[in-house]
Amino acid sequence: MSRPSPDGLAPVHLAPDLAVPLRAGPLRLVFDRGELRWIRLGEREVVRGIYLALRAEGWVTIPYEIRDLEIEAEPLSFRIRFAACHERGPVRFDWQADITGARDGRIVYSARGSALSSFLRNRVGLCVLHPADVCAGRPCIVETVDGDRAESVFPALIAPHQPFRSVRAILHEVSPGVEVEVRMEGETFETEDQGNWGDTSYKTYGTPLHLPHPVPVKSGATIAQSVTLSLFGITAAPVEQAAASVPGALPRKRNSAEPVVVELTAGGELPLPALGLAGAGLAALGEAEAARLRGLRLAHLRADLHLDTPQWTGALECAAANARLLDTPLELALFLPDDAQAALRELAARAAALRLRVASWLVYRADDRSTADGQAAAARLALSGIDEAAAFGGGTDQHFVELNRRRPLPRSLDRLAFALNPQAHAHDDATIVENLGSLRRIADTLRSFAEQTPLVISPVTLRSRTDASPKAWRKHGERPFTDDPRQDTSFAAGWTLGFVAAAAAAGFSSLTFYELVGPRGVMEADRGFPVLAAFADIAALPGAVVAQARSRRPERVQALALRAKAGPVRLFLANVTADAHPVRVDGLPGRARRAHLGEPSGEDSGPELELGPHEVVRLDY
C-alpha cells in the first residue's frame, strides 16, 4: 500500500495532487484523480482514458470528490479502490471504484453507485477515450450487445454522427501483431467522434443518445458497470517495436531530465492567420485600454448583434466607437430573427450612418446560431453597400458539430466559421493542451465539403460562453463557469500561442479570440494579461509568416515560430505544465536574445535552456 513520499506516490485516503504512474505488465499508464489516463504500450497510446462521468440535465458536468483512496502498486501490477461523491444542486450520487491492472496487461475498471437524491441526468456511467491520432482511419472489429461482430473503421474524417452503435466491445491493432480489446458491461454503449467538439479522441459511452434524455433518477437507483482492457498477441518483440516506432526516442519517465527538443526546419512557411478579438460591443474602451490594444495591430474586432432583441443598437454603437479608437475594422456576427428583412434594413441604415469599416459579416439564425440557406444572400443584398470589401460568412456560432451535421452550401459563403473552446468534456490543463491536436482533423473534414472556402474560427474561448448550471447551483463566491481562472495566467498565453501555431499548420485563415476586457478578455482594468503580451509580440513582426517548428513533446512544450520578411526569426516557447523542463532548439544557428513576453530582449541564450513551470519565453534570432 502506498505511503506519503517525496517521489510522488499517493498517500492512502487522499487524492494525489499529481498523476501517479502505474504499470500493468507491458502497459504503462497514469492514475489521475479517479481516471486512468494515457495507457501505453511502449510509447504507442492504446487508450487515452477510462473514467466515470455524471452529466446532469443540460449536459452539466457534476464533479466528484474522492474519499478513502487506496493504491496498492507493484512493479508490474496495481489495485486501486476509492469512494466518490457527486454533490451539486439537486444531485447526490455516490459510487465505489475497484480498478486492477495485471501482469498480462489486463486492466479492469469497475464502478458501483447509487443515487442519494432524485434528479435528472443525461448520463451516468463509464466512458472510454480512444486516441484519434492513433486510431483514425484504422480498421477495427465492433461487437454489439447482441453478440454480432462486424469489421469497421475508426473514421478518418470527423464523423458527424455515431460511427458505432449498440456496442459491447471494440477490438483493434495497436502495434504489429498486438491487438487490444475494450469490453464494456452494465449498459448499452455507443461511440461518438469527439473531434466534433474540438477533442482528440473517440468516446465510447452509455446511454445511447437516441434514447430520450434527460432521464429521471430516483433516490436509491443503482448502477454497476465495468470496462475491461485486454491485450492479445503480446510478446517482448512488439513492445520493443512499439517503443522504437515513435520519433525522437521519447523520455520514458514523466519528469525525465532529457531535454524537450524543438526542431525548426527551413522552407514550407505558412500564412499567419488574421488575428482579432471579440467583445467589441460589450464595453466602451478607455484611452489607456485602447493604447494597449493598438499595439496588437488587430485584423478585426468582433461584435455580436442579436437583431431579434432591442439591445443590438447599443452593441453596434459601442463596437463602432471601439473600432474607431483602435482604427480597426469590425467582424459583425448577426443573429437574425425569422423575418429578417426589416431588421437588415434597419441595420443597414444605422451602419451607414456610423460609416462602419467591416471586414466581415457572419450571418446566423437567432434561434439556433447556425446559417440557413439563403440568409447570407439576403444579408449581402441588404448590407453590401456598407463596405464593399467586406466578406459574408457563416456556418455556426456553436461547436463544429453543428456545422458538420448541417453543412451549408459553401458557394453561398465567402468564409466558413465555427466557434471553439477546448473544454467541452474535460477541464484539466493536460486535456486543454492535448486538444490543440484536433485542428488539423477539423480542417481536413471541412475541406471535404467546403471546397476552397476560407476557414474561420470565431470566437476561440478557454471555456464555453454560456454557463449551463443554474446560478443557484454555484457555491458562495464561485465564479460562473464561463470565467476560467487561467485566463489571466501564463498558461493561457502559452496555450494561445500553441493554438495559433496549430491553426496555421491546419490552414485556417482567421482566428478571433476571447474578449477585449474583463475576466474572459486580454486585460482587466489597468492590468494586461500575459496573453495580451503574446499578441503584442506577434504584432511586432508585421508581415511575418509561420515557420515550421515542431515540439517532440507538445504536451509539455508548445512552440510558435515566426519569420519576418527580412529574415529574423522569433520563436515562442511555452511550458504548459507545472513542472520545469529543459529544452533544446535544433535548426537555428547562433545564439538568440531571450526575453519573457512583452519585455525587451534580454540575455543571450544558446540552443539549450530551462523553462520553469508555465513559463513562456521569446527567442529572437
Image: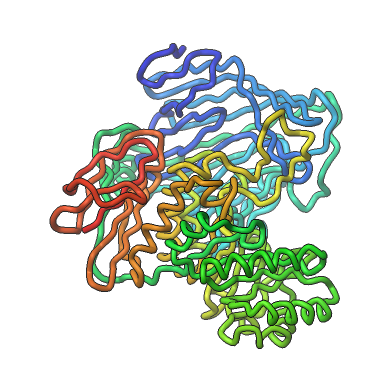
Quadrant placement of the C terminus: bottom left
Depth order, front residue of 366/103: 366
Residue 497 image-quadrant placement: bottom left
Where in the figure is residue 454, as x and y percent of width and height? 52, 76
Above or below, 444 relative to 122: below
* Horizontal arrangement in the rendering, residue 591 relative to residue 127 (left or right): left
Please indicate whether residue 395 sits to the left or right of residue 118 in the image. left
Going by the image, does 216 lie left or right of 296?
A: right
The furthest residue to the front = 287
Colouring rule applied to residues? rainbow
**Quadrant of the image occupied by residue 445:** bottom right
Residue at the spot x=79%, y=34% of the render? 472
Nearest to the observer: residue 289 or residue 492? 289
Observer-nearest of 9 and 574: 574
Q: Position of residue 29 (x, y in %)?
A: 44, 33
- Nearest to the observer: residue 602 or residue 196: 602
Q: Residue at x 36, y 47 (%)?
A: 574
One can see residue 272 in this view: yes
Residue 318 lies in quadrant: bottom right
Say if 202 sits above or below 363 in the image.
Answer: above
